[in-house]
Amino acid sequence: FKRILLMIFLMGLSLFIFVALQASREGEFNMDFIDLALLNFKGSAFGSLPAFSYWFDSTFSEEFEYTWGEFTFNRIMYYIFEVPSRAPGMFGEAIWLGDTYREGTTIYTVFRAVLQDFGMVGSLLIWLAVGLIGGVAYRKLMQGDVRYIPILSMFYSFTLIGYLASMFSWN
């Protein structure tokens, strides 16, 4: 029961911090602003899966030109191969989840980046490799081999942030 109360408290605290940060960014704070900030929160926190679903259903096809890691590994590609950096928002076009501009999102999960970079078959192979590497790292770490901590940390980071975007494509 204490864990449930702690989780409710942490969720409320997170929502309060989000609204406070939005208020400081916008430079205003009133009751109308709280409604707008909550709309923005809805798009930011829960918009990535609907946006990805909409893009996949309406736009994705195997006929586009693959970008071979440009979206998934943008920062790595930028520093190693001098591929141009992506602008914030990464994909440019927004998906509108409601009637106001605050209900739009440009976040499409890591799955869109991998699909655009490597296509359907390539993305399935990428996810198979990621799962196998994560599984091996976990098994080795459970056997006491601490050399696999960085690999498992990268796996968990990539997985936990994946509902938003790739951890290797920050702006």
Image (cartoon, grey):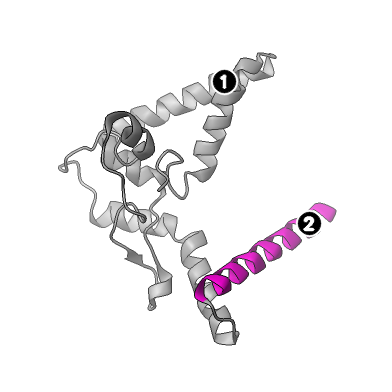
Q: Secondary structure at mark 2?
A: helix
Is 148 contained in the magenta span?
Answer: no
Q: Position of residue 75 (x, y in %)?
A: 37, 38
Q: Is residue 92 left or right of residue 47?
A: left
Q: Position of residue 131 (x, y in %)?
A: 48, 27
Up-down: is 69 above or below 46? Answer: above
Q: Nearer the viewer, residue 70 or 26?
A: 26
Q: Give the residue drawn at x 59%, y 85%.
A: 30
Q: Quadrant of the N terminus?
A: bottom right
Cα distance in 3D space between marks 2 and 1: 31 Å
Q: Position of residue 169 (x, y in %)?
A: 40, 42
Q: Is residue 44 left or right of residue 81?
A: right
Determine the main secondary structure of the stretch shown in magenta: helix
Q: Secondary structure at mark 1?
A: helix
Q: Position of residue 126 (x, y in %)?
A: 37, 29
Bounds of the magenta segment? 1-26
| Residue found farthest to the bottom | 31
Q: Give the residue drawn at x 53%, y 74%.
A: 37
Up-down: is 107 above or below 131? Answer: below
Mark 2 in CB contact with mark 1 (< 8 angstroms): no
Q: Nearer the viewer, residue 25 or 112?
A: 25
Look at label 1 and name its amino acid: Ala
The answer to which quarter of the image holds residue 10 is bottom right
Is 21 contained in the magenta span?
Answer: yes
Which of the labelled discs sits on residue 6, or is there none? Answer: 2
First in residue order: circle 2 vs circle 1: 2
Look at label 2 and name its amino acid: Leu
Please tell me how crowded label 2 is: few (under 14), some (14-19), or many (20+) other residues with Cα within 10 Å. Answer: few
The number of discs equals: 2
Give the residue at mark 1: 137
